[in-house]
Image (cartoon, rainbow, N blue to C red):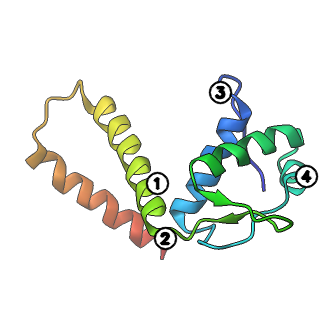
Amino acid sequence: MSVLFNKRDPIYLQVITHLKKQIVSGELKPGIEMPSRRQMANQMKINPNTVQRAYSEMEEQRLIFTEPNKPSRITEDPAVLNQLKKEWLNQAIDRFVSAIDPIDMSLEELLPMIQEALSNRKKAVK
């Protein structure tokens, strides 16, 4: 698992963002067993304490859960997963709206362009 870390954000937050993206995209399925903290640290080439902090934060957000003497797992709670998807979409929409803010276009002009971009993206994935 290779992650390119930037120098401005704390690494544990970048780990959380990376794992959230994998959950939202379906790469990490609900209920799947997470690597141990040490395994994740080795895979990402970071300190195990950093992974511990990321996992703890994700447990607080109910994105993962850990039962005694068992590995951590991705939540299967649909409400938590739906909330994560909404948060991810809201962040993307905020970035998009900020990026196009200087351009004077109506929603009616933007919608066909967005639909075309999504359609082209889906074709490229297939």
Looking at the rendered image, the disc whose residue lies closer to the viewer, 3 or 2, is: 3
In which quarter of the view is residue 116 placed? bottom left
Q: Nearer the viewer, residue 38 or 114?
A: 38
**Which residue in the structure is indicated by mark 2?**
125
- Disc 2/disc 4 C-alpha distance (Å): 33 Å
**Which residue in the structure is indicated by mark 4?**
38
Task: Describe residue 126's horizontal placement relative to residue 68 as left or right.
Answer: left
Residue at the image point whose x is 28% and y is 35% from the top:
97
Could you tell which of marks 4 and 1 lies nearer the N-terminus?
4
- Disc 4/disc 1 C-alpha distance (Å): 25 Å
Could you tell which of marks 2 and 1 lies nearer the N-terminus?
1
Residue 26 is situated, as x and y percent measured from the top left of the image, at 55, 68
As drawn, the label of residue 35 is: none
Residue 25 is situated, as x and y percent measured from the top left of the image, at 53, 63
Kind of residue at disc 4: Arg
10 Å crowding of disc 1: few (<14), some (14-19), many (20+) = some
**Which residue in the structure is indicated by mark 1?**
84
Kind of residue at disc 2: Val
Looking at the rendered image, the disc whose residue lies closer to the viewer, 2 or 4, is: 4
Kind of residue at disc 3: Asp
As drawn, the label of residue 9 is: 3
Q: Secondary structure at mark 3?
A: loop
Could you tell which of marks 4 and 3 lies nearer the N-terminus?
3
Q: Nearer the viewer, residue 42 or 60?
A: 60
